[in-house]
Amino acid sequence: MIEESSRFEPFQDEPLRVTSDEGAWIASFDLDLDEAELQTLYRELKRARKLDERLGVLQRSGKSSFVAPSSGHEGIQVAIAKSVQAGRDWLFPYYRDYGVVSALGVPLEEIIGQMTGTLADPAGARQMPSHPSSGPLNVFTALSPIASHVPPAAGSGLAQKLAGKGDVTICSFGDGATSEGDWHAAMNFAGVQGAPVVFVCENNRYAISVGLEKQSGSATIAEKARAYGMPGYQVDGMDVLASLYLLRELVERARAGFGPALVDASVYRYGPHSSADDDSIYRPAEEVAAWRARDPLPRYRRFLEQRGSWSDAQEAALDAAIEEELDVAVRRAEAAGVPELGAMFEDVYERVPWHLEEQREEMER
Amino acid sequence: MIEESSRFEPFQDEPLRVTSDEGAWIASFDLDLDEAELQTLYRELKRARKLDERLGVLQRSGKSSFVAPSSGHEGIQVAIAKSVQAGRDWLFPYYRDYGVVSALGVPLEEIIGQMTGTLADPAGARQMPSHPSSGPLNVFTALSPIASHVPPAAGSGLAQKLAGKGDVTICSFGDGATSEGDWHAAMNFAGVQGAPVVFVCENNRYAISVGLEKQSGSATIAEKARAYGMPGYQVDGMDVLASLYLLRELVERARAGFGPALVDASVYRYGPHSSADDDSIYRPAEEVAAWRARDPLPRYRRFLEQRGSWSDAQEAALDAAIEEELDVAVRRAEAAGVPELGAMFEDVYERVPWHLEEQREEMER
Amino acid sequence: MPVMNLVQAVSYTLASEMARDEAVVVLGEDVGKRGGVFLATEGLYDQFGPDRVIDTPLSEAGIIGAALGMSVHGMRPVAEIQFAEYVFHGFDQLVSQVAKLRYRSAGQFTAPLVVRMPAGGGVKGGHHHSQNPETHFVHTAGLHVVYPSTPSDTVGMLRSAIRSNDPVVLFEPKRLYRAVKEDVPEDPDHIVPVGRAAVRREGDDVVLVSYGGSMAETLQAADALAEQDVASTVIDLRSLMPWDRDTVLEHAARVGRVVLVSESPHTAGFMSEVAATISEQVLDHLLAPPTRVSGADTPYPYAQDRAYLPGPRRILHAVQRVLEY
Amino acid sequence: MPVMNLVQAVSYTLASEMARDEAVVVLGEDVGKRGGVFLATEGLYDQFGPDRVIDTPLSEAGIIGAALGMSVHGMRPVAEIQFAEYVFHGFDQLVSQVAKLRYRSAGQFTAPLVVRMPAGGGVKGGHHHSQNPETHFVHTAGLHVVYPSTPSDTVGMLRSAIRSNDPVVLFEPKRLYRAVKEDVPEDPDHIVPVGRAAVRREGDDVVLVSYGGSMAETLQAADALAEQDVASTVIDLRSLMPWDRDTVLEHAARVGRVVLVSESPHTAGFMSEVAATISEQVLDHLLAPPTRVSGADTPYPYAQDRAYLPGPRRILHAVQRVLEY
Ligand SMILES: Cc1ncc(C[n+]2csc(CCOP(=O)(O)OP(=O)(O)O)c2C)c(N)n1
Ligand SMILES: Cc1ncc(C[n+]2csc(CCOP(=O)(O)OP(=O)(O)O)c2C)c(N)n1
Ligand SMILES: [Mg+2]
Ligand SMILES: [Mg+2]
């Protein structure tokens, strides 16, 4: 039931890349994206980066209690968002996926509302920061337990397959997530059912302090796909174009009924695991520096510049526009206000049962 | 850290066999087991088969409340027992593994005591039938939840590795077990740690009624080993010699510090899933018949006969001896008596706490 | 009116709901051709085919998680866990995911699914085929928990559960699967609402409260009491979350003597909640301490399979204690 | 005498026990170089090396299962679950395997291991970093469950746990990790036995019973009561399985008014067991209903992080109710 994709071969030794670290096109096929789209990708990379930076500022200034930085993951995250049809397909992201939701079109004020615990969060500030969601855009509310969202993503794919409309699901997670039993149950379920799900591992080679060699029996995440009868691909997740080409192909393949695939996207997180972490305890500074040199943003900007498709003036205008957008979003998110005490008793069930009514009364007394 | 075994290549397309269905030696290397050992293997195959048949009789006559037949699995089960050093290495079997424990040397009266709920069971008749164990022989008490014994087996291997004495663990399970999250967690843990564990899947292609194609995303269980950085082997589990050669090599490999391996042993269960099952609902009779034709016992007997190493007289003597042994074991098991009421309150903790004392009094009142 | 036993009531209701609403699908281990190991899904595969009666791989986390993913698309999956204690392999999916989805998404996503599981002892199943894990789910916000004890209630409550927009965990007393047959309501919209207890008989001397499999022994005890001229009120809770506190308190206050019968482990079992609530709310009406008769705080034993259960003898002892108090 | 806070008491005791007995090993996520996300294992990796301080893959089932496998070989693993609610991924290993091993093997195999988990709210962690799942384990036969609230008790109880031949689940109130420093006993054999409560203060007007993180607010409430000339007895249960029923009943019977404080969800939480037992055993001594002040039956909220907890205000309300009853 599951066929290979047409352009890319699974289970290669090296991650797929279409641009060099210097930003040169190195693929064996021709680029076929128009300039507007190419520029949009850069705008979204930059927007994700600046959003992440702003979230850090909000956290340090006490407006947010926590943040799990996404810088370094933007290439694959923007590609995920741009490989699906927003509002039609479904996304099951994880806590680090700000770049996915911002590039998909979730309003920044909602994302920032979630991060700062205000009612701008469509999920009502019910969860800690770094747990975005969007009902209208089919973004399943991110949650904390690692890999717990992967079985529902498999079920989402099965529902889509049964509905027969060609919709697909993308589910992303970290390298650490692949060790959980729930991850395995989900991958196998999707494999057996041929569910149209593209699984994307944002493989930054660390789960907090635990390096990949202590995490996974296999050297790559991609080869784990063999256990589920699906193709596995390594991609340079800091190469936004490689990520996009691969994901688009796998999304279309899933739409056409050829089932799930696993993508092992090599990335690096530039920040600590979270605002509660000190990564200098376990990561050498040189390692961070080496990955900084491969930053997906300047790399892609060089690519655009070499085509004459991006200028300093555009950069300055973009920066200003994003800062302005962020300022507005922060203001609006704050203005939305915080939930009342009693809100904690709602949405446990469709209707508030007697015991919660009483508990609410007791608490409000 | 994990190297390949020397004689057998992992990840072959076909299961390893050293004898044909007609019992001819077909391996590329020479047989190097002495006649006594070759005959012992047959004795154990027969003992396992007759034990299984007797357990069926005991169940049908109401002496046992349940049985999960092992007939058809004897080749791999006897090989498991004969590939380890009894009392030194550790075994984590599953409920269908009568052939493992009988060939390892667990007294039949203990096995039958377990099956019939008497105090001949070294585990005190605490569990339902088909859950054998042996403290002295390091047979971890089998249990009902599928795959739950696999993580402890990985931990057992890690303990052995840390102890540095070259002891190993063998853990067996069915094909269905490979779908559970706990199985994955264990396999990955063993792979990362290079724990000396040989994992053996007794792949009878059914989990109760669910066929392998609905069970596993991958076509074989063997290839799942890639996800854990360990070698995976297919073997004809109805070829006792192939099973034994492969397992001995993998056990020695683990002893030598080269880590875990996964064996996908192709078998068939001739009986229903259990005494509570009716397999005619989901298995065509022709399929059962086709696998009956490959029965590991007559096949191996033909092998011995062709070498002049087995006669009808020996067969008759063996049958009589086993029947006698079974009769004695049944008598002794029955004579051991059943647990008293109060025994249910012991071994919950090392010492009986106050609340269990009181519950016991209430119950005995 | 159709006459059936409790397990037939399950398949009857599933078929009726699947015919009514094509969003309803069944999934689990062996639910297809095999019809489930207890035959609770017998006939459904032939009637509705493999897209609506889905044999899954052997993973409870996969079953519950997949059901959740289907339910956010508006489907109404009914997942079967083959034996209740195997839900522990999917515990995180049920308590961290299913139970909290409406809450953590503020209603953007909901999980209108049912998880059915045969539970309870007395079937010579040892400790992994006999447990009553309902308290774990009662203690988990976001789940409804129901535990019918009769064929008719099974029809009405399973139907309620399937139509509920909240996730429902439905326990089935496997010991009673084939114990009695009775007429069940034929009306395809007959439901028994979640949260409502049934008063099985009324009497002024003592109140017996129970649910699930233990209803059988509780009613036997009530019969024995009647022979001794002790008149009992017998309440079948049926729903544990939410539970019908008002009904229990009304009778507890009226009679003043209460015995609570449940085969789940004693310590911190659901009946401790009922006992605590009775004392908290109607202390001054009590003529004797609310007294529990429970399963033991041991793993479910094989050899003492029946003794473990709170049988009539132990229930009568407790009644005697509260009567003589 | 060494002065330390509660989380330092954990690493101090682990180091002391690892030095004493080389069967003791530590395993979990990030317990190595990182020293744990709360630094509860800080320094151990440098002192004892990677064979005794084992960073595991990200799987709670793997951690608990591996600990079990090591323990049957005579090792004494101390497993860390990074946040208590993540134990739900390893629930089956803990409740079906670890808890039942001695029983189902009739003592042929035992599981002398410890599972440590930071628990409790008030840290702005939302519902997956704030929970108190202790009741699930109290309701599971075969496990000891302890929940210290002070650095000294942490030393004594963690040591008891490590030396116990039964599996022990040890909850650590993460909200109190750095709340207070105190002298802890230096004697490397000092233990606090499992099953013994501590009476933190004595008074005749009301008995406050609590444990874990809620001890902080309970003691604050007791202070506030003292200012209003209400004298309270404050009991820190410390052990939940087995729990110190005798101490609780003695004071409950003496004083007649009891308030039970726990931040775990209200319905079918451990305090329902304590309340039920008090009513069952000393009904006639009660001057008011044993009254619970609990966490809500909602997923742990983020925005109302502090309000969720039973704070002094709610405790005082309950005390007022039992005093005025
Ligand atoms: C079930 C569970 N266990 C442990 C944790 C604590 N934890 C949060 S993030 C994390 C590491 C995740 O690493 P990875 O999956 O590689 O994603 P990354 O953060 O590197 O993007 C851990 C252990 C958790 N959230 N859930
Ligand atoms: C966790 C769990 N889920 C479900 C079951 C019920 N069950 C018992 S055996 C079995 C099938 C196991 O199949 P397999 O692993 O292939 O072993 P086989 O019986 O074929 O040897 C099932 C589903 C169980 N025992 N444990
Ligand atoms: Mg990572
Ligand atoms: Mg099988």
Image: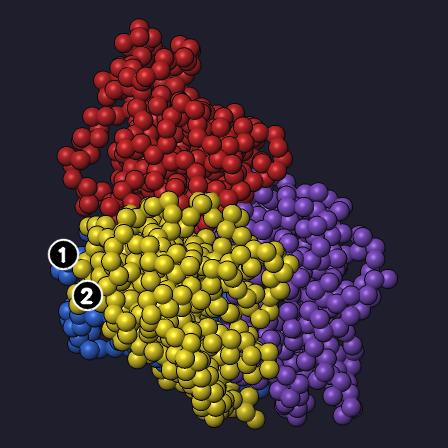
Chain colours: A yellow, B red, C blue, D purple
Residue A41 sits in quarter: bottom left
Q: Is residue D211 visible?
A: no
The residue wearing badge 2 is A166
Q: Nearer the viewer, mark 1 or mark 2?
A: 2
Residue C322 position in % (x across, y down): 55, 73
Q: Nearer the viewer, residue B148 or C173?
A: B148
Rendering quadrant holding ligand 4: top left
**Pointer 2 local density, CA inside 10 Å: few below 14, some 14–19, many at least 20:** some
Q: Secondary structure at mark 2?
A: loop
Marks 1 and 2 close (CB-CB < 8 Å): no
- Marks 1 and 2 sit apart, C-alpha to C-alpha, by 27 Å
Q: Nearer the viewer, residue B299 or A43?
A: A43
Q: Which mark is residue A349?
A: none
**With respect to residue D7, does A133 lie above or below?**
below
| Pointer 2 chain | A
Which residue is drawn at the image coordinates 41% and 50% (left, top)? A221
Tell me the chain of label 1: C
Tell me the SS state at disc 1.
helix
Q: Which residue is mark 1?
A: C46
**Residue ID at (48%, 35%):** B2
On the rendered structure, is D7 left or right of B12? right
Q: Are marks 1 and 2 on the same chain?
A: no
Residue closer to the observer: B313 or C293: B313
Q: Residues within 10 Å of mark 1 (few under 14, many from 20)?
A: few
Q: Is residue C112 left or right of residue D119?
A: left
Quarter of the image where the C terminus of chain A is located? bottom right
Q: What kind of residue is marked 2? A: Gly
Q: Is residue C309 left or right of residue D192?
A: left
Farthest top residue? B308
Nearer to me, B108 or C17: C17
